[in-house]
Image (tube, rainbow, N blue to C red):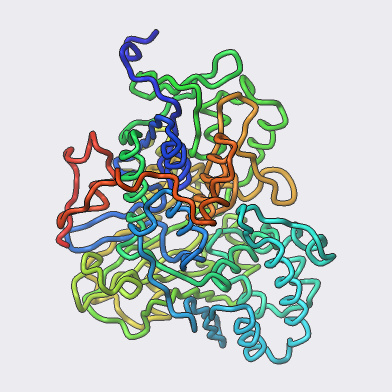
Amino acid sequence: MSPNEAGSPSWDAIVIGSGIGGLVCAGYLAAFGRRVLVLEQHDVAGGNCHMFRRRRSYEFDIGVHYLGDCGPGGLLPSLLAGLGVGDRVRFRRLDPDGFDRIVLPGVRFDVPEGWSRYGDRLLETFPAEAAALQEYLAICGEIAASARYSASAQPVLGGSPAVVRWSRRSLSRLFDHCGLSVAARTVLAAQSGNYASSPANTVVAAHIRMLDDYLTGGAYYPVGGGQMLAAALVEQLEAHGGQLRTKARAARILIEDGRAAGVELTDGDVLRAPLVVSNADYRRTVLELCGGRENFPEGVVRRTEDAVMRLPLVTSYAVAAAELPEASEANIWYWPSGDVESAYARTEAGQFDELPFVFISSASHKDPGNTAVCPPGHTNLQIMTACPPGYAPWGVTEGPASGLRYRRVAEYRAAKEKLAACLLDRAEEVLGPFRDRIVYLESATPLTQERYTLATGGAAYGLQSWGPHGRRPDVRTAVEGLFVAGQDVHGGGVVGAAVGGAQCAEAILDRPVLAEAYDGAVFADRALLPERGHDWDPLRISRGQARRDARGFAPTAR
């Protein structure tokens, strides 16, 4: 027994990683009486739901720019309601006539709610391609209906010939089959930044499922920002006897006689539990935390070694001391070349001479009552693009997960500054000049993402491929008592990660908790949830009880 193990509490389950998938899984286990410990290597829980503050005047969301299907009875609200915190996170509906704006040379397309309205607008924009678009939309409609979540939250991919033929083929092949123009393809795939992979490397079902969440379920933004999701889930976990431990990085998962036995931390602490859930990056889980071939079958290890991650992202966070006329609550997807497929091909090949696209989101427009994002009369912007995989574009050969202090590397700083300038150049092409009114500017790269989430290569959206035809790992593993959760087992994005967490809890509990939550079941004891005072702060709550008032906390001027 390790000296640090003596006298340590025994847990029913340990969850590695406090991204939304890990917190949802932990919450359901805790609601059913399991004593759960959540480990988070960062200072704050939330993963890509995390937000950060600067100068007590600005707040920026890392990964929550909008969410699909968050109206009454929607997927994520149902998950939260099942944990008793449905009323602790409010969602603001974005403009149903245009929640996304797609811009390319000669084309401006506002994406509305509803497949019918979406189709009509496409036909108005590309009247010469009516037959091709009608065929495309007919196939998409069948796949969307087939893959849409049932009460069990399990998409069913089967049925009609169109579904069988196209669900697992690439989006590019469907474009080719329909004979669509370059401009039409770009509009149809413009929102692919929501999962960061090209039409050639995205199965049709994955693209349609992403789009259907918004077209059928509506587009929403959480009031108060993405940290509200994490904070509500942390409150529920702690109220039911669980614990969040931040600044606690897992070094390895303990596996004894073929079954999970606990977790050893990088500081030497050994924590025992008969059940371990990894919400960490799947590659890191299998190849590093579990020792690869020591504990997993050869086929699983080989698929994991060969797995391809989705493209990493670069983001500039800016505040302008002005109300920018072209900025609105609608996200802007700007494709300067007007050719989605060639833009991705260049990026995937490592070319970064021009940006593939620019995504612009304004938190101050999406959450107009939240004065913490910026002072009145200012505009809060997140400006994002995809970039080539690997460390070479940043002048380094390894990342922060290996201990590299990358921020002091001159080549890295130069590449980051150059890219930030390019992002502003492209954003001004859409929004008009605003550079001289910027009062705050900060940029994040894939190395930043890797530093805070330990995602392989800084890929915020996880696995692109794990075997053929869109295959993904199961929540169960070859190791008894070891499960995996999050977006790598279900799909990218916040809602996909949350579903992956719920599916993991269902496998452990052997109970269809999401289907029951859809029917109105509440598994948590709402009477245990803490009151929220006037000084309640989601970032502070998300540090966990033990570190809630530790040094390094940045309060807000709410």
Pick the residue in front: 554 or 337.
Answer: 554
Using the rendered view, name the quadrant where residue 347 is placed. Answer: bottom right
Q: Is residue 222 above or below residue 35?
A: below
Can you see residue 399? no
Q: Is residue 487 above or below residue 29?
A: below
Where does residue 110 sit, x and y in percent of width and height? 52, 83
Using the rendered view, name the quadrant where residue 508 is placed. Answer: top right
Residue at (29, 46) in percent of width and height: 529
Q: Is residue 422 above or below residue 84?
A: below
Where does residue 258 sit, x and y in percent of width and height? 61, 17
Q: Decide if residue 448 is on the left or right side of residue 213.
A: left
Q: How many marks?
A: 0
Pick the residue in front: 502 or 42.
Answer: 502
Using the rendered view, name the quadrant where residue 360 is placed. Answer: bottom left
Residue at (62, 89) in percent of width and height: 125
Can you see residue 92? yes
Q: Decide if residue 337 is on the left or right side of residue 202.
A: left
Q: Is residue 182 above or below residue 522?
A: below
Where does residue 98 sit, x and y in percent of width and height? 48, 81
